């Protein structure tokens, strides 16, 4: 059914691009960018439009469904999000099968290594954070003496402080659309302490996780398919999905076209043809050979190529530490990126949600704002957005949907437009707002909870570092797999050097080779990973993204299940 | 500054409509709908595009801002949201003034009657709900004996039940993108008990309040400015804002054009001209004379008019109980609406967030799904979406951002597309999900908390009914004000029969007369209301929307402040 629907979706997009429906995204003059032989321009004038409308009206009258794949917004059809895509649906089905009949499969649980969702795999929440949230959810507790038997005294103090920042102490009221002012100020103080440069609560927009903040910026910047966003390849597919939903588009070179087509898990010939005409962003390639380094020369090349095709590139997305690649950018590299954005007039969209996830001694997190300020650049020099989330770090509170963006370098008029978009959704959830303020201002030395907090925090981070290392070594020990070091974030992105026979088998099954591998892995072991084609990769290379999040006591078993599967797979397909 | 920004925003939209930027929303052939003399079609071919691009590139190189009102998405510029608009910003500034210098203004507090935000005005949260949330936020409490001293035993039981529905009891994990399955099933059971017809958890999408659900449906349905959504006038401006953001548009008759222009608070001549060309929806007028009745003849008229202009009308929005008008639709009326949608092939978008806010004996809430099923219509007959929120009802938990939509009558392929859009944002916040399950399945007779719960619930609802009545009577007692009964929801929408002299003064000040009145009211009394022009109204009529939410003990003082202001205003302007 899902496969069928995906096929229908593709046909519907293809049809809409061929102009069988009145579409807003066409000009009657053929665009210099459209590959003419594939999509001959057809006049969409008054007559054609009236005919299309008449057709739609008669359809409605005839009682066919009011909404079908042929009549929904084609931008929705185009959008893909592999992290929760086909492989995950398959895993959910297997899980249901396991529940019904525990002996039906060669494993007894599904291990979701597809998504950075630490608590789903057993990571415990930080006690102090949850104490404060629990008290703020039920402030009546603060007046009762019995509360001291259940909560640490600094959590009680903190809950009071937070309530005092909320007008009327009303945790159930809509807040200011940017978030509660006192909490924003606290976050700004946390940023200033981290960076050593001034930050203002007026520049903070609290959001339900980082994703809505990313959508808000895409909505602001993208006017049409002639606007491009420079994205890394491989990239976290939130960016390509958001750009698709907001109608951004286009691309430059055949290499990039090929690269983009590989973003899609299923790629039969018609699908590839389709992708050629609807490239959604301006990707730049991270260099696997240098540990997924970000080369500014590569950025320039892609930017110039895009501009020569008439694309207005609006912004550069940088994910640091990297997702799915786990690299931590060097300070020198970051400086070059800032200079590049300044010189080229690009908005720098800095995804910094993994800022606390660094596992190597020789690397440190530097925010792009700190880098820009240390270069002497002010608000007047470049617009910069930093995204942060309560879902990552050592806290991993994905279900709480807390996060913020710090925006600097935008004019008051443009900020007001961002505020307006935020206000249409009223505000982000107040518990998430509170949690965002806690992660940016955790317990300090001398607080009652400080020691136990540090034990929990360091326990999680050091365990993540050990898990990253163990998995990386395991991948590198296997025939035909090479894996860069996870310096940060929550993922490994090993490269699969697949035998030609395996590639042939994948083609025969109508899937990309890495999607084929991931499906076989799931069916043999219950381990869910995301095929590299969901993130993009250099043409002809194949990867999987695997989180480092299963609990540490399970890692040895996972490694041995993985090894066993991989050896069998290679035995089956070795050329 | 704000005024200045609004002017600049208008000029930027006007410029983009005149075609000074390469825009996706133009076809080279003049549209039959565009008022040609105002917007002469200009060829947007390859050469023009290349020139535009070269301009943008040279601009960037010259170091002008990368983002300005002239270069952001014009859909963002077009969107307006009066509920948090100019008057509220003015109120926030006055509040800051009051904090600095408490004697500087003729009142000592700002009373926010602009928005349905009960807890901001002192309404207390329902204890049982907050107990459960507090326990779920810190599940470690459930293992401690001291917890029984602080929480009711059924709240503890309920927290256990909820945790058992969450995979791994992980309240900090991303959930299924539709929301936690067990909670959706519980909500479905609540819907079935309410309606007497089957409901399925598979049809529930849990969302961060109702707004993101509305956006999701608009995103799905609107392909271009040729797609229209049939909206009530007056309407809650979330709908017009969401349609604008998603690029829907267009309109039919001069009446409607005029009506739409009045949706905008500020309306100098250039602004009106602008609005003429970018009407964002297909409004239908509620009939004030019959207590804001919804006439199906009016719906048909607007639908046919829209279709004759080439608009594909995709859906009908009905808000019941009404916002801002407070009417509760009669069952017979609802039946006709369902028949209308079925016959015309429209999606019925039913905003039912005020389903528990009914203040009159002779009216009852009936969901549109119940009406459709009682007419014998099934999933095959019409697509229907019901929006519900934890922000309204007696619970008023706006800050928790919980809500859901129940979708029925969509094909599996289309549902999958809705799921995909939901999955790009991962999931809604888990506390909001839990709260949504609680409001749809509150304590039952026999539960320990039942009696105290009912006292809180009925106390809030009966107080709201008394407040609605007191304010309605007060409005109707004043010269030049008539006010329909608030049968439900949280608002009164009194009509201001303003003297000609007052209208002249408003024109001289460059604002709509109701906006002028609201501003004067705020400056004299600290009471914040929204001008009717923020919701739309029949041309030549003027209204304000005022919530019934100030606490009951404050109502007499509010009424006397309001009366005093109004009498002085009439003395100043009486013709």
Image: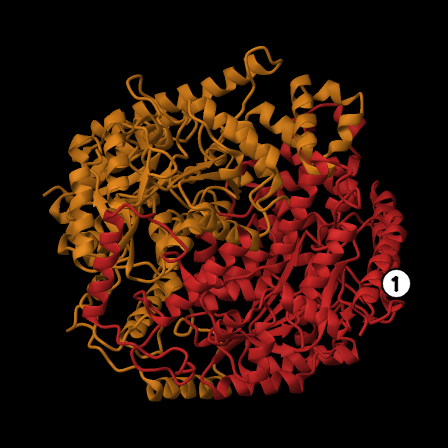
Chain colours: A orange, B red
Which image quarter: residue B232?
A: bottom right
Q: Which residue is mark 1?
A: B474
- Above or below B252: residue B445: above
* B468 or A561: nearer the viewer: B468
Residue drawn at the location 61% of the way across and 44% of the way down: A176
Tag 1, which secondary structure? helix
Q: Position of residue A416 (x, y in %)?
A: 50, 50
Which residue is at the far left? A575
- Above or below B161: residue A36: below
| B466 to the left or right of A546 | right
- Above or below B551: residue A443: above
Which image quarter: residue A147?
A: top right
| B168 to the left or right of B561 | left
Chain of the residue that carries numbered disc 1 in the rendered image: B
Q: The N terminus of chain A lies in which quarter of the figure? A: bottom left
* A388 or A193: nearer the viewer: A193
Q: How many marks?
A: 1
| A257 to the left or right of A156 | left
Residue A493 appears in view = no
Q: Position of residue A431 (x, y in %)?
A: 61, 38
Which image quarter: residue A40?
A: bottom left
Residue drawn at the location 60% of the way across and 56% of the way down: B210
Q: Position of residue B257 (x, y in %)?
A: 55, 79
Q: Residues within 10 Å of mark 1 (few under 14, many from 20)?
A: some
* A259 or A296: nearer the viewer: A296
Q: Position of residue A370 (x, y in %)?
A: 37, 28
Residue B459 appears in view = yes
Q: The C terminus of chain A lies in which quarter of the figure? A: top left
Residue drawn at the location 39% of the way across and 27% of the way down: A357
| A69 to the left or right of B320 | left
* A447 or A567: nearer the viewer: A447
């Amino acid at each position: 059914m899902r496969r069928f629907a995906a096929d229908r979706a593709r046909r519907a997009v293809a049809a809409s691009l061929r102009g069988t429906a009145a579409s807003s995204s066409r000009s009657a003059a053929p665009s210099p960018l459209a590959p003419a032989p594939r999509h001959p321009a057809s006049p969409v004038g008054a007559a054609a439009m009236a005919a299309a409308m008449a057709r739609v009206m008669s359809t409605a009258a005839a009682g066919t469904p009011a909404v079908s794949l042929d009549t929904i917004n084609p931008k929705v059809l185009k959008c893909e999000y592999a992290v929760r895509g086909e492989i995950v649906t398959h895993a959910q089905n297997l899980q249901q099968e396991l529940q019904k009949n525990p002996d039906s499969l060669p494993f007894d649980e599904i291990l979701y290594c597809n998504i950075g969702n630490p608590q789903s795999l057993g990571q415990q929440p930080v006690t102090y954070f949850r104490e404060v949230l629990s008290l703020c959810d039920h402030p009546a507790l603060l007046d009762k003496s019995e509360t001291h038997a259940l909560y640490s005294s600094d959590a009680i103090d903190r809950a009071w402080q937070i309530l005092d920042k909320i007008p009327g102490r009303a945790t159930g009221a809509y807040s200011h659309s940017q978030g509660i002012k006192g909490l924003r100020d606290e976050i700004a103080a946390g940023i200033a302490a981290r960076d050593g440069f001034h930050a203002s609560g007026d520049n903070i927009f609290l959001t339900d996780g980082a994703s809505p903040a990313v959508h808000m910026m895409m909505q602001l910047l993208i006017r049409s398919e002639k606007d491009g966003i420079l994205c890394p390849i491989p990239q976290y597919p939130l960016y390509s999905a958001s750009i698709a939903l907001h109608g951004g588009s286009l691309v430059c070179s055949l290499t990039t076209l090929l690269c983009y087509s590989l973003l899609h898990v299923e790629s039969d010939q018609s699908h590839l043809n389709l992708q050629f005409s609807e490239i959604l962003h301006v990707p730049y390639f991270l260099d696997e050979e240098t540990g997924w380094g970000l080369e500014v020369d590569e950025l320039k090349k892609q930017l110039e190529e895009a501009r020569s095709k008439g694309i207005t590139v609006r912004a550069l997305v940088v994910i640091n530490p990297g997702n799915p690649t786990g690299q931590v950018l060097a300070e020198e590299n970051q400086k070059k990126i800032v200079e590049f954005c300044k010189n080229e007039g690009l908005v720098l969209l800095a995804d910094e949600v993994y800022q606390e996830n660094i596992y190597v001694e020789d690397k440190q997190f530097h925010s792009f704002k700190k880098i820009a300020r240390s270069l002497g650049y002010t608000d007047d020099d470049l617009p910069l957005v930093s995204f942060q989330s309560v879902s990552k770090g050592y806290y991993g509170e994905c279900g709480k949907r807390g996060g913020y963006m710090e925006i600097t370098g935008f004019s008051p008029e443009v900020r007001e437009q961002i505020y307006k978009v935020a206000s249409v959704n009223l505000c982000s959830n107040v518990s998430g707002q509170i949690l965002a303020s806690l992660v940016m201002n955790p317990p300090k030395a001398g607080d009652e909870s400080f020691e136990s907090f540090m034990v929990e925090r360091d326990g999680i981070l050091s365990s993540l570092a050990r898990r990253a290392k163990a998995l990386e070594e395991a991948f590198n020990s296997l025939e035909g797999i090479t894996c860069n070091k996870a310096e940060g974030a929550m993922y490994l992105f090993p490269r699969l050097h697949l035998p030609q026979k395996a590639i042939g088998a994948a083609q025969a099954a109508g899937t990309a080779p890495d999607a084929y591998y991931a499906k076989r892995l799931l069916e043999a072991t219950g381990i869910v990973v995301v095929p590299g084609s969901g993130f993009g990769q250099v043409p002809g290379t194949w990867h999987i993204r695997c989180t480092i999040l299963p609990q540490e006591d399970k890692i040895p078993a996972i490694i041995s299940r993985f090894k066993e599967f991989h050896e069998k797979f290679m035995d089956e397909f070795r050329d």
